[in-house]
Amino acid sequence: QDGKTFKAPAAITLTAEAIASETIRSVAFRHRGVVFPQDADQFIDRTVNPPYTIFWTGVGPGRYTITARALDSLGAAAVSAPITIIVSETNSPPSLSDIPDQLSEGGFLNIPLVVSDDITATESLTGQVVVEDSNLVPEGNSAISFSASGGALTISPAPGQYASTLVHVTVFDEENVATTKSFTLTVRKVNHPPEAPGSLSMPATNEDTPVTSPPDFIVYDQDTPSDQLVVEATSSNP
């Protein structure tokens, strides 16, 4: 847990791995720097049984450099590499980056979130999503998830709904200290072009004699009723 941050008064579990050809007599944990500025090394606790673990409680604010010293039955000793932990006086809210406004044409959105916290691991954060227009995004059509690499917000707009609304994203740490960021979601209707499947084959006609399209000439559009479509024809030899 090198570099980890705790909130005061902290309860910290410290474990050391000790291996020797002789019997390990004890493992002692010490720290330097109870408060700023640094103090001399101070004894924390000693354990004689594997796993060599102690429970350090009531730890006040400060930056602590911790080492473990193993002593074997012949009096030989070895000291571990140091680790540093920070105990903070207050629990700062999670960090959540700004979320840019989103434009959708009715499809599923997957929005990455940049999140972190000084005490809670990212994958242990929790979140809440509130969409002001529940017709545009019904309850249950939005979710937030977290992993060690960050967070993700997913949104599924309701079919046939087009509008703009505010979306509020809140991230909570393990003590329910929260950060909220908001953005605008706009879902717009897509105007699909008309379609005319197949090919148009016009019959031959005499000069100055009108000709009509074949009866199997079909056009349709996803957005406009067929009786409101306008069909225009041009000639390559006007």
Image (cartoon, rainbow, N blue to C red):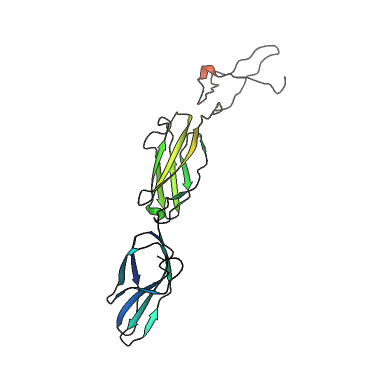
Q: Is residue 85 left or right of residue 226?
A: left
- Which residue, as the protein is rendered here, is positioned at the far left? 49
Residue 124 x %, y %:
37, 53
Above or below, 174 relative to 195: below
Above or below, 122 relative to 83: above
- Which residue, as the protein is rendered here, is positioned at the far right? 238
Which residue lies at the image location 49% right of the left edge and 38% below the top edge? 183
Residue 71 x %, y %:
34, 82
Image quarter in which the C terminus is found: top right
Task: Using the image as rendered, state which of residue 216 and residue 230 is in the foreground.
Answer: 230
Which residue lies at the image location 40% right of the left edge and 37% below the top edge? 130
Q: Is residue 107 left or right of residue 127?
A: right
Which residue lies at the image location 46% right of the left edge and 35% below the top edge? 166
Residue 221 x %, y %:
52, 25
Residue 59 x %, y %:
35, 64
- Which residue, as the protein is rendered here, is positioned at the far bottom? 74
How many numbered circles are shown?
0
Above or below, 117 relative to 154: below
Which residue lies at the image location 43% right of the left edge and 50% below the top edge? 94
Quarter of image, res 203: top right
Quarter of image, res 31: bottom left
Task: Using the image as rendered, state which of residue 32 and residue 165 is in the foreground.
Answer: 32
Task: Using the image as rendered, state which of residue 207 and residue 110 is in the foreground.
Answer: 110
